[in-house]
Each structure stands twice: as structure tokens, then as C-alpha cells.
């Protein structure tokens, strides 16, 4: 197979995606290990190699002497065509062995529109797509990641889902797999045993029945499986495994730098934000641990940039001592520090002085809504005064470009709320020209990124409908037209409305969507998250052919009493809390963040009664 592979590499773009051998990649001898694990990312190499979770799990598994973890990415269209032509099955980068040689095939599910690519990768590997057709314990297909918060559309294809943090859970899973493999146990026996480990969900052991109106009547566990599967949480980030090296690609990737995690969870509680809820409780790393991680990664990779990663980096309580320490040695080594996820309500003069030393690009903030009323409804908890004060500090300190993230179609949104997006952007431009100490000879740039609201599981808005596509398109066009005004200094980019509609369908879908995915793959769907490959019309034809209404999933309001497809999956946030938050949103009432007052969301129960918010 290797000879065939080397023959086709000159015929495809970016052959370095497929050769492996990068700095810090790990090679083992197959005969020396008893387990082989293929970590699969259902997207192109440049996307997957930018994913922090893959680096962590890759090196963590390879710490085991009995296991070899290798990487696998979705080949681009040109490479796949050559592979199918030459009869080359999908392979892992390190050994070039086909995925059929592996015990466990693990996918990370970061985005709903990657689901069809999962199926395409399995087919290209020569592995049966349906879990019920894979009879043996070998080629066991598992999946983790944020989309596992509602994995039901993939229930027909995946053997085991992993809920929550993976570091400890993955090790327990592999120990169990090795035990059952060595004992010659059956796949069914192994799957039943998986249900005894907190955080493992086996969809085939749950029967789902439906009411006449299409809603779920009951989710019934079988063969001793628990009625509710609780996600796993790593309680102590100070001692949890973190690699001291990353793989260094031969080609540029999307985030071409190393990253070190600052903390998990979020104190804010923005009502639309799934990550802010499913990653609770809040757990911080000591700044000394982060600093040491950063030094190790820079020394072992040769990168000249490191990113401090979290959902809201400026909420990290030890940010000042961390930056003070890092700036000393990064300045000496000419290393840039990237601080994503900054908030306008804690953008202090102290922080700006640090940023002057480490950041050269524009600043990015996320007001999410143009009006104060709607920001209160979504619990953004920032005021226009704080927004204007932040841009004033930034402009006075030499920045000229500000990027603002907004969402369209948020629950309770009105026409006036959309108009306020442009009005706020114009006030920011005016603020630049009003400053006497603004950068001379330069002009401001306000970049608006407008995405459409997608209701997500385990959030206060999980019951809300997505706004209909026609209305969202009209709002996007309004923003674009207003930004075209002469000398506006405002630039608008908006996400594709059709793709976010399909995202909403699968985000809140149930296992009746598995046949939709299977048929979509049969008709050529893959790389749905890439605009040039996404074929909305094919999906609409399939929904029509199979008699399923996608708007029933995306555009329908759920009742609070309705059984939701993910109700048997416990991410620590109680439904009572989510309902309270939804009702407060209808009245545009805010909830204070976790360090001001505990809102009793339930996440503390995952961490021995401690939420970690440092109130």
C-alpha cells in the first residue's frame, strides 16, 4: 500500500497532509503493543492539527507502553479520488496502516456539519458504517467532543460515546477494552461493561419510543444500562496530564502555534452559549503550571507564538502574574503571546499595557447583540458604556482595528435590535475620531462578523426555535447594505444561512436522523462545513424523499415538559436552572456571573460540591 501511496502523492495538492513523520510524532512497533488506537478528525489536516484536544489525547495515550495512538484526517477531494482509484483504504499517518488494522477508531465531534464526513471516512477505510454490522470487538468506533452533548443523529453508527473530559475517562476505557480483548469477550459483553464507567454512553442499549405528534415518549435503557449517563469531569487541572510537546506540521495549519490551557468552564452564563454550560464547573490551573507548560512547548517545537486558551481568558484570576512571568522570557526569545476570548467588561488599563508588549493584531470582542435590551436577554452582562470604554482604551493605545461578533435571530430579537448593530458600530467609528490622542494618519476599521443563532442542547435556549431562513437572510442583507454607506469604515461578514439551518437540525435532532445522514453520504455529501462542498439542495431532497420535515427540528419551539433527545445525558446543569434562565430571558433579566453570586446551576455536583468559581 505504501508504494501505491507514494505513487499518487505527486498528483494531489498539499501531499504533506498525508506523509506523517512530523517533528514529535510518535512511532512504535506494532508487535510491541497490544492496542492500536486511531484518533480520527473528520476534517482536513489543517483543521485537525489545530485542535488542542487531539494533541492532548494523542500524547496521553502514547504514554502507555501497551498502546499506540496514531492520527487520521479526512483526505481532501483530490486525494480521496486517487485513493479510491488505486484501491488505497484510509490509513493512519504514523504507520500508513489501514484503519481496519486498529482496535479502536475514535472520532472527535467538534461540529454537527462534520457528521457526514465521519461516515465517509469509515467507508473509505472499508469499515461498515452501521454499528450493528460491526460484529467483532475490533474496529470499535467511539466518539467524543462537544457534539456528544447530543449524539443521537449518529446513534446508528457509533458504538460508544465519551461524555465530558477525556483524560481520565480514556484511560479507563482503554483498560477495560484491553481486559475484554485479552479475555476473548464479545463486543456485546464489552458494551454492557462500558455502561458501568461514568461518562460512557452506549446508544444501542437504549430504546426510544415516540408519540403520535413525533415527540419522544420514552428513552428506555436496556441490559442494566443507567437511566442517565453522567459526564466525566477532571477535578484537578493542576495535576492533570498535559503534553510537553506538540507535533509540528510541515505545512501551515489554521492555528499555527502552540496552545496552553488556562482554565475550563466559564463564569458568565450567556444563555445561547453551549460551551459555557457543558464545560462547567470552572477549574483553573495555577499560573506556575501554565507558565511551565508554555516554556516546555516552545522549547520542544520551535514555535514563535503561544496561545492562552479558555472560553474567557481575561476571566482567569491569575492572568496578571502569569503574563508578568511569561513576558519576561517570551520577550527574550521573541515569542508572541496570543490572548483570545477577551471581554470588554474586564479590559483594564493594566491589561492593555500587557497587550502592548505581546499583541500586534486587531482586537476582537463579542457584544453578540446591538441593543442593551437584547444583551440583557441573552445574559451577556456588558453595557454599552463598557464597550465604548474598551474601544476608547484600545484606540488611545494605538489600535485601529476592532472586530465585533454579533448574532442574528436571537430569542426575543426585534428589527430595532438588528438596527442597533450598525448604530453601535458607527458610534465606535465616531469614538475613534473624537479622541485627541488617536493614532495619527490612520483610519479606524470595525469588522462585524454576524452569525445566526443556533439553539443548542444543555442551554437555556434549547427549547427556542431557530428563526426561519428567509428572515435571517433579510437581516444579513440589511447589515451588508448599511455597511456599504460611503466612508462607513464598517465591514460585514455573515455566515451561510443554509448551513446554520442544517446545523440546527442536527444539533437538536434525534436518532431518526441517522437514515438522513446515511442517505446524504450515499449521495455524495461530505465536508459540509466547507462552503464549496456543501450541497443544501441534496439534503432538502433527502428530507423530502424520506418524509422528514427539517423545520420540525430547527424551527419548532419545544415545550418545557417535552422529553428532549438528550435528556438522558447529564452534563451537570439542571433542567430547572435552564428553565429559570429561559424565563428570565423573556423578561430581559440578567443573572450575575458565578463570582458575584452562585446561580445554583447544578455543576458543583460534578466537582464534589465545589464550583471552582472563586466567588
Image (spheres, grey):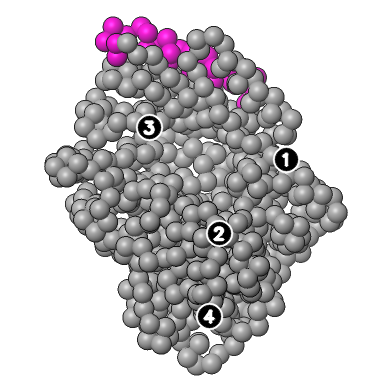
Q: With respect to residue 159, does 352 lie above or below? A: above
Helix, strand or loop at label 3? It is loop
**Which tag, 2 or 1, sits closer to the chain's start?**
2
Q: Measure how far apart labels 3 and 2 are at the Cα level.
A: 46 Å
In the rendered structure, which disc, 1 or 4, sits on the residue that comes first in sequence?
4
Q: Residue at x 21, y 50 (%)?
A: 291
Q: How packed is label 1: few (under 14 Cα within 10 Å), some, or many (20 or more)?
A: some
Q: Nearer the viewer, mark 2 or mark 1?
A: 2
* Crowding near the residue tagged with mark 3, few <14, some 14–19, many ≥20 C-alpha atoms within 10 Å: some
For residue 11, the mark is 2
The CA span between labels 1 and 4 is: 43 Å
Measured in 3D between alpha carbons, the distance from the residue under mark 4 to the one under mark 2, in whole angstroms, is: 26 Å
Q: Position of residue 146 (x, y in %)?
A: 52, 54
Range covered by the magenta-colored residues: 413-440
Mark 1 lies on residue: 555
Rendering coords of residue 72 (x, y %): 50, 65
Q: Residue at x 76, y 57 (%)?
A: 523
Instruction: Kindly indicate whether the residue at mark 2 contacts the one at mark 3 (C-beta within 8 angstroms).
Output: no
Amino acid at each position: 500500500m505504501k508504494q501505491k501511496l507514494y505513487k499518487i502523492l505527486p498528483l494531489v495538492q498539499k501531499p504533506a497532509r498525508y506523509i506523517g513523520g512530523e517533528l514529535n510524532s510518535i512511532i512504535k512497533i506494532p508487535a510491541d503493543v497490544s492496542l492500536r488506537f486511531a484518533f480520527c478528525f473528520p476534517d482536513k489536516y489543517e483543521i485537525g492539527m489545530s485542535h488542542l484536544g487531539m494533541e492532548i489525547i494523542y500524547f496521553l495515550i502514547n504514554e502507555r507502553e501497551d498502546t499506540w495512538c496514531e492520527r487520521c484526517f479526512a483526505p481532501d477531494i483530490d486525494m480521496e479520488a486517487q485513493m479510491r482509484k488505486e484501491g488505497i483504504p484510509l490509513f493512519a499517518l504514523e504507520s500508513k496502516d489501514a484503519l481496519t488494522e486498529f482496535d479502536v477508531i475514535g472520532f472527535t465531534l467538534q461540529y454537527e456539519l462534520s457528521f457526514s464526513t465521519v461516515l465517509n471516512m469509515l467507508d473509505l477505510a472499508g469499515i461498515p458504517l452501521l454499528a450493528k454490522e460491526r460484529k467483532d470487538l475490533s474496529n470499535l468506533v467511539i466518539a467524543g467532543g462537544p457534539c456528544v452533548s447530543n449524539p443521537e443523529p449518529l446513534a446508528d453508527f457509533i458504538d460508544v460515546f465519551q461524555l465530558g473530559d477525556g483524560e481520565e475517562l480514556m484511560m479507563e476505557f482503554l483498560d477495560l477494552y484491553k481486559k475484554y480483548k485479552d479475555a476473548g469477550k464479545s463486543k456485546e459483553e464489552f458494551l454492557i461493561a462500558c455502561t458501568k464507567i461514568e461518562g460512557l454512553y452506549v446508544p444501542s442499549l437504549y430504546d426510544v419510543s415516540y408519540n403520535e405528534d413525533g415527540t419522544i415518549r420514552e428513552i428506555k435503557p436496556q441490559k442494566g444500562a443507567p437511566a442517565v449517563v453522567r459526564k466525566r469531569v477532571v477535578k484537578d487541572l493542576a495535576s492533570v496530564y498535559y503534553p510537553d510537546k506538540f507535533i509540528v506540521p510541515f505545512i501551515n495549519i489554521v492555528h499555527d502555534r502552540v496552545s496552553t490551557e488556562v482554565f475550563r468552564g466559564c463564569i458568565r452564563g450567556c444563555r445561547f452559549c453551549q460551551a459555557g454550560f457543558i464545560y462547567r464547573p470552572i477549574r483553573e490551573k495555577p499560573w506556575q503550571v501554565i507558565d511551565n507548560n508554555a516554556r516546555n512547548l516552545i522549547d520542544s517545537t520551535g514555535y514563535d507564538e503561544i496561545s492562552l486558551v479558555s472560553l474567557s481568558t481575561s476571566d482567569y484570576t491569575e492572568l496578571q502574574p502569569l503574563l508578568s512571568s511569561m513576558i519576561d522570557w517570551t520577550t527574550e526569545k521573541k515569542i508572541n503571546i496570543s490572548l483570545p476570548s477577551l471581554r470588554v467588561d474586564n479590559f483594564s488599563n493594566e491589561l492593555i499595557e500587557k497587550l502592548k508588549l505581546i499583541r500586534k493584531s486587531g482586537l476582537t470582542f463579542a457584544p453578540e447583540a446591538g441593543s442593551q435590551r437584547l444583551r440583557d436577554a441573552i445574559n451577556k452582562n456588558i453595557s454599552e458604556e463598557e464597550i465604548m470604554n474598551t474601544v476608547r482604551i484600545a484606540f488611545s493605545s494605538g489600535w485601529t482595528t476592532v472586530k465585533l461578533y454579533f448574532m442574528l435571530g436571537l430569542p426575543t430579537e426585534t428589527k430595532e435590535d438588528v438596527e442597533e448593530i450598525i448604530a453601535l458600530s458607527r458610534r465606535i467609528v465616531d469614538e475613534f475620531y473624537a479622541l485627541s490622542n488617536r493614532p495619527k494618519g490612520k483610519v479606524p476599521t470595525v469588522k462585524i462578523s454576524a452569525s445566526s443563532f443556533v439553539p443548542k442542547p444543555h442551554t437555556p435556549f434549547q427549547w427556542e426555535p431557530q428563526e426561519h431562513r428567509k428572515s435571517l437572510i433579510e437581516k444579513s442583507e440589511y447589515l451588508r447594505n448599511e455597511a456599504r454607506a460611503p466612508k462607513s469604515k464598517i465591514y460585514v461578514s455573515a455566515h451561510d444561512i443554509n448551513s446554520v439551518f442544517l446545523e440546527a437540525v442536527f444539533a437538536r435532532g434525534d436518532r431518526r436522523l441517522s437514515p438522513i445522514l446515511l442517505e446524504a453520504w450515499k449521495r455524495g455529501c461530505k465536508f459540509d462545513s466547507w462552503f464549496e462542498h456543501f450541497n443544501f439542495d441534496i439534503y432538502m431532497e433527502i428530507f423530502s424523499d424520506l418524509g422528514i420535515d427539517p423545520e420540525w427540528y430547527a424551527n419548532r419551539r419545544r415545550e418545557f415538559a417535552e422529553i428532549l433527545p438528550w435528556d438522558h445525558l447529564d452534563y451537570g446543569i439542571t433542567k430547572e436552572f435552564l428553565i429559570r434562565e429561559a424565563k428570565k430571558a423573556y423578561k430581559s433579566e440578567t443573572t450575575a456571573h458565578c463570582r458575584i453570586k452562585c446561580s445554583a446551576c447544578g455543576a458543583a455536583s460534578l466537582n464534589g460540591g465545589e464550583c471552582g468559581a472563586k466567588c
